[in-house]
Amino acid sequence: MRIRVDTELCQGHGRCYMLAPDLFEADDDGYSQPTDERAVPAELADQARRAFMNCPEDAVILTEETS
């Protein structure tokens, strides 16, 4: 699983980094960005899904990887 933030959609509500602080952080302008570009560790998958489901602008993009 990978996460990214659509910077065109993000309005800086901060729900993603409140719900998934291990995966997201605020940039200098208060908009969300992933803390890491690598695949989401299995133990943080629930946080990633929670952030995805709670973004009011649908700016958090979650892609499930298949092997």
Image (tube, grey):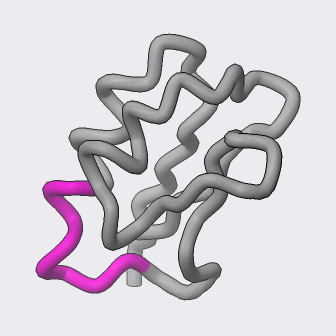
Residue 42 among those drawn in magenta:
yes
Q: Position of residue 9 (x, y in %)?
A: 76, 23
Q: Name the residue rendered at 21%, 56% in the picture.
A: 47
Horizontal and vertical percent position of residue 33: 65, 57
Where is residue 54, by image quadrant? top left
Please determine whether, in this image, residue 8 is positioned above or below residue 61. above
Residue 18 in the image, given as x and y percentages of width and height: 31, 44
- The image quarter containing residue 44 is bottom left
Q: Quadrant of the N terminus?
A: bottom left
**What residue do we see at 79% from left, 55% from top?**
28
- Give whichever of 50, 14 is nearer the camera: 14
Residue 30 picture location, percent across and down: 69, 41
Quarter holding the C terminus is bottom left
The residue segment tinted magenta is 40-47
Q: In the displayed structure, would residue 18 be above or below residue 47? A: above
In this picture, is 42 found above or below 26? below
What kind of secondary structure does the magenta stretch mostly adopt? helix
Q: Nearer the viewer, residue 29 or 56?
A: 29
Q: Which residue is found at the position 50% from the left and 55% from the top? A: 63
Q: Quadrant location of residue 29?
A: top right
Residue occupying image coordinates x 70% and y 28%: 10
In the image, 55 versus 42, the foreground residue is 55
Report the number of numbered marks: 0
On screen, residue 22 versus residue 60, left or right, reads: left
Extreme residue toward the top, this view? 56
